[in-house]
Image: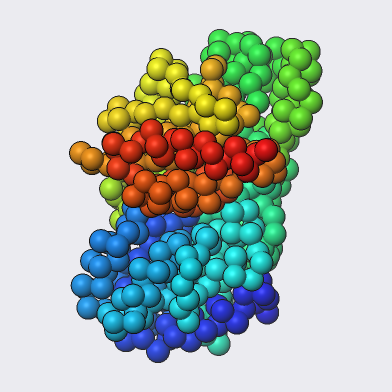
Amino acid sequence: MAPVPKLADRAAECAERLRAAEEVLLASHIDADGLTSAGIAATALERAGIPTTTVFKNQLDDEEIASIAARDVQTVLFTDFGSGQLDAITKHEQRGDFEPIVVDHHQPADAETRYHLNPLLEGIDGASELSGAGASYLLARALEGDEQDNRDLAALAVVGAVGDMQAVGGELVGANRAIVADGMDAGVLEEATDLALYGKQTRPLPKLLEYADQPQIPGVSGDEAGAIDFLESLGIELETEGEWRRWVDLAAAERQTVVSGLVQRGVERGVPADRIESLVGTTYTLSAETQGTELRDASEFSTLLNATARYERADVGLAVCLGDREEALERARRLLANHRRNLSEGLEYVRENGVESGEHVQWFDADDAIRETIVGIVAGMALGLPGVERDRPIVAFARKSEDERKVSARGTATLVRQGLDLSSAIHAASVAVGGDGGGHDIAAGATIPTDRREEFIDRLESAITEQLT
């Protein structure tokens, strides 16, 4: 039975068309969701015996679509983008340049194509209920032959969803639930309730707590010595045979002791109850992966993938998704170390330079001080820094070229509940100044002419003011 019945017919139609293709050009986005989308689709196509070439694009604009058309391949499968660019894609389709199959979860443009698998077309929320990787997974299930079972790909789909910030309140919801169930049935995924901090597989215990900033635990967060004192006060052994212990090395009783201690510390120091509750959440473990590695935890896996593509090495991220646990994984780890350094420097830039604020929007322009491929991640991490309010979306600018700015905007789940839709606001404001953009209600991006930045901010401020009032 299809995991998401509402989308079964669309998935089956796309799969049928792909089976009829002599060869397929697979074009995908470069973030964690895009890489897992490509990994799932490429694996399913290979298992179905369909020759496939994969290309990655940071942004799918007219120029990039024209470069795809110039490759002279009759069938093009777009994953994790394509819906928002349907108007440009269908022009090529009408000219006979290629036949598109679009598997995406972003807001569709005002154009139609026959092979289009997108949750939004069937009333399923593409920002929180099904990611690009989730849509690719539905395609993979539809591509199964009589003796095939592609449910093992559910693990990658969960990595994509988590990387796409779809874990609402820490948990995957909606159509994503069916994918989690498939992964658990296939024995590749475990769902549990655990400490909801990043780095449980790989970080030494003191570092795990020192870097915990959602929520901030007074005397522990941002304080290595404080984190060590706190763990020692609970009687937790920090080292085994000269090696720091990690969260995954703790026995269940020890984990319970640490969680209880963190809750008690939070209550004593006046941390709001809802923030304390967020210490514990749903975790997704990839049971086929080695314990203590980045690939074992969906959140850490997605960060590793982000670190490859944002430094022009999407090929490395794809190789990891396709199962390379040697050379590609080693290269990905080196890229991740570099990525973390750059994020840390980016946050330091925001701390030092601050943000400018309007009535409902705050922003900063990093120019070339922060790479345009990571400025959105820095913006999201900056929410909650001193002087950066969580009650309004943050917009980050970085230099894309001599005369263009990359725009990345981030909101919060609370703002979305109040009516925020960054996708429509960013799209309208960017188009009005001669650029283009879109995305999701909670996170969106665009490219705009540098000399029209002020006008863009004014238009965005108006659009978001309207949404939130």
Colouring: rainbow
**The quadrant where residue 455 appears:** top left
User: What's the residue at 35%, 41% (across, down)?
Assistant: 406
Q: Position of residue 154 (x, y in %)?
A: 57, 63
**The quadrant where residue 173 appears:** bottom right
Quarter of the image with the C terminus is: top right
User: What's the residue at 63%, 29% (across, down)?
Assistant: 391
Q: Is residue 227 visible?
A: yes
Q: Is residue 65 above or below residue 145?
A: above
Q: Position of residue 301 (x, y in %)?
A: 49, 47
Quarter of the image with the N terminus is: bottom right
- Decide if residue 303 is on the left or right side of residue 138: left
Q: Is residue 432 above or below residue 199?
A: below
Q: Is residue 207 above or below residue 81?
A: above
User: What's the residue at 32%, 59% (across, down)?
Assistant: 61
Q: Nearer the viewer, residue 413 or 37?
A: 413
Q: Is residue 39 above or below residue 351?
A: below
- Decide if residue 184 is on the left or right side of residue 140: right
Q: Position of residue 300 (x, y in %)?
A: 51, 42
**The quadrant where residue 367 appears:** top left
User: What's the residue at 51%, 24% (across, down)?
Assistant: 357
Q: Nearer the viewer, residue 160 or 439?
A: 439
Q: How many marks?
A: 0
Q: Position of residue 463 (x, y in %)?
A: 55, 43
Q: Is residue 240 visible?
A: no
- Decide if residue 368 is on the left or right side of residue 101: left
